[in-house]
Each structure stands twice: as C-alpha cells, then as structure tokens.
Image (cartoon, rainbow, N blue to C red):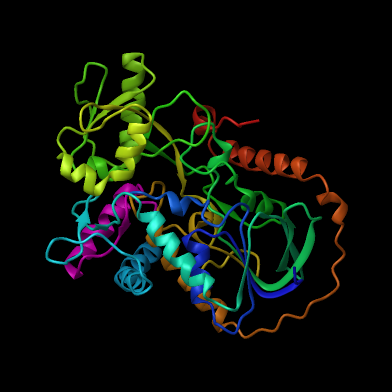
Amino acid sequence: MDNFYDVIVVGTGVAGLYTCLNLAKEKKILLLTKDEVLNCDSYLAQGGICTLLDEKDYKPYFEDTLKAGRFENDLIAVHDMLVQSKTIISDLILKGVDFDKNIDGSLNYTREGGHSTFRILHHQDITGKEITSKLYGRVKELDNVTIKEFALVMDILEQDNSCCGVIVKEGEKEPEAIYSRDVVFATGGLGGLFVNSTNFGHITGDAFAIAKRHGVELKNINYIQIHPTVLYSKSKGRRFLISESVRGEGAKLLNKDKERFVNELLPRDVVAGAIINQMKKDNTEHVWLDFSDISNEEIMHHFPNIYNKCLEEGYDVTKEPIPVVPAQHYLMGGIRADICGVTSLKHLYAVGETANNGVHGANRLASNSLLESLTFSKNCARVINYDKSVFNKKNIEIKMKKYSDVEKWQKENKQLVLEEIRKNDEVFYDKWCNSKD
C-alpha cells in the first residue's frame, strides 16, 4: 500500500462513498473499510430517504424533524439538509438509483412514524441496498480512488495539532502508517457493542475511541436510538429490522391479547418505550406486529424482503402477525462536527452516523439518516476541495509496537466508548448497554 494520499476516507457507507464522489478528481484518495465494502449499515436501510416535497412542505418537514429530535436539533443543520434534499435526490437518480414509481411514472412516496405526510422515497424495502450499491458502482469507475477492504484503522496520526494520516492494519499484514493531508471518518455508529442491534457486528465505534485518545471532542454519545420493531429471535447476532414503513402503510402493534396499545406513527423513542412497557405489563418477551390492514399486493410490491425474511423464520405476514421487540439501531451523537464535517482537530472530518452535527437532535426522524449522510458528506468534500493548504509531511515518531496486539487494542476501544456512554447517561447504560464481551 502507498504511504501517502491526499485524502483518506474511512468507511464505505453512503457517507464515505458520496464523499469520494464529490472530491476533486485530481486528488489521490484511499477508501478504507473494516470489512467488505457493502457490509455497512447504509446497505441495510429499508424504509427510504426523505425529501422536501415543495416549498409548502418546508415548515411541516422542519417541524417534524424538530419534534422527533425533542427540539434539541441544530436549526442551521436541519435547514441545510432540507434545502439540499431535492438536489441530492436528483443526483442519486442521475447516478442510477431507481426509486419506486407510480403507474403514471411519478415518484412514489411513503410515510413513517413522526412524519406529517408522505415524503419518503424508496426502492421496495431495500432502499439502502439500492443507493449504496449504485454509489459504489460509480466510485469503482474513479481512477483516483484506491479501495481497501478488511483494512482496520487503529489510530490517526497527529502533528502540530492536525490529523495527518492513519495507522492501518490490512488483512494479515503488520500495522503501517499511511499519511494524508485530510482524513474523513465515515465509520458508522456503535451497534456492535450491543447484544441486540440492527447493525453489523464489526461496527463497534472505533472512531469514537480514537477521538477520545486524541482529545477530539465528542458530543451526546449517549443519544442512541432504539428501533421499536425488529424481528424477535432467541438466536445471537444482528437483528432483522422491520421497517417503519410497514407501520406507515398500516401495520398495527398488538399486545398478548392481540389488542392495539399504541399509535404506531408516533416517534420511534415513544413507540419503543410503549412496547417495553407493554412487554413488562404482559410479562412477555415480545409484542406482535399485524400486517392485516396492508393488502397482499402491497406487501409483495413494497416489502418483498421483509416478507421473505419472515417466511424464512416461519412467519407468513400475509396470514399472521409476527413477534417484534425494540433493539439498538442508530447513534445521533458522535464526533462533534459542523455541517461540513469539520471537527475539533484540524484536517480530521466526520460525516454520516459517525458525526454529531446536531441535525437529529436527541432522536432521529425516520428516514433522515441517508439524506443526512449524503448532504453533509457533500459539504465536507466541498470544504476539502476548496482548502488550498499544502501538506508538508514531517517525520513523526510512531511507536508501532503498541499496535501489535490488535485484539487488546479493540477491546480497550470498546471499553472507552462504553464508559463514555455511562458517564453521559447511566440510566440508559444500565438499561441497554451490554457488552458482548
């Protein structure tokens, strides 16, 4: 592997991919991922991606986002995301993303919890797969981007209060130092720290531990969203998410007596809390999600992936309700960043779920995550492109020996992140944070 690049992007979800696509073509870019490229949480996103419908929708969409975020949102970030949304969607379509359409050829919109209207675009119930795979296809066409899979970023390099590269272990090779003027963290969240999560298990919050080690400011790391509905299972491993769109299209939550107990279109944190309370009241390990108000045709057209997965687990959603429980899903907190991904360390940027730019507040509105990742990664790339400063590599004394025990290093990283969550919110930690170790 070369030891110098203009930009190193860590993470291959939509934030990392879109950063690469918006960086200047003359820049030499290294794109790293801890696992396979498409083993990212962006790929798993089911429901869709929000967009501003028109000028009249600005106020309702803005208010929906703030209500879900408990009014802790950064207003500038929310405004920027909304006003860029239509341009982002147009660019995705130009890049080959195929959103579902109505019979007349117009875009089809769905609705999810917390939304006051239908403003969510989708590709069946695999929207994340559609967007991520199409963006990855465009990135592979770029001659200036080198992609490395199974490349674990263990640390960043720092000199003169600036980030200037990373320590990376690629496959079975020894860890090595790779230099660059700019580093972009797009590493996702921290679901791998939880026993029950919709995230891939290898997404364990490495970026946050690295930030802690270097004094890079974190913000609201305890703002962790619990998704109300994942398919109940006694087996270990990642939980299969039942998209909020299902409830948006009419699915109902039922208690043990098959009685409805909550308004399914309330924000996620409210619905998740209601489910937990109902499970305690009923002394059960799950509640039921009933699809009977959704036509079989709509299930097959809009939710084929959910239908097939449930069928594999022994449930036919066209004939019976399925057992569901809440699980860790998304991080609203993270590395403090502005709407351009700028962090408290020069030349270190954070975008996507890794960043806390305040757009989500204390709780993310459904289907705002893909839009957020695309909006602010585009902003980030623009800032990097406009920065004309020259990187002068200096000799940095690196004690590579401390990176030799990868397992120990990663275990310490997990503990650092979990302790940060506990420090910020012990009640949440005691309720939800159970380390896999």
In this picture, residue 272 sits left or right of residue 330: left
In this picture, residue 432 sits left or right of residue 104: right
Q: Is any atom of residue 34 visible in this view?
A: yes
Which quadrant of the figure has residue 86? Answer: bottom left
Name the residue: 60% across, 44% down: 202
Q: Which residues are magenta?
A: 47-72
Of residues 286 and 117, the one drawn nearer to the viewer in this rendering: 286
Of residues 141 and 418, the one drawn nearer to the viewer in this rendering: 141
Q: Quadrant of the N terminus?
A: bottom right
Q: Is any atom of residue 112 visible in this view?
A: no
Name the residue: 41% across, 67% down: 375
Residue 416 percent across, percent down from the top left: 67, 42
Residue 22 percent across, percent down from the top left: 49, 76
Q: Quadrant of the C terminus?
A: top right
Q: Residue furthest top?
A: 283
Which quadrant of the figure has residue 282? Answer: top left
Q: Residue furthest left?
A: 104
Query: Is residue 57 a member of the stretch shown in magenta?
Result: yes
Residue 95 percent across, percent down from the top left: 38, 72
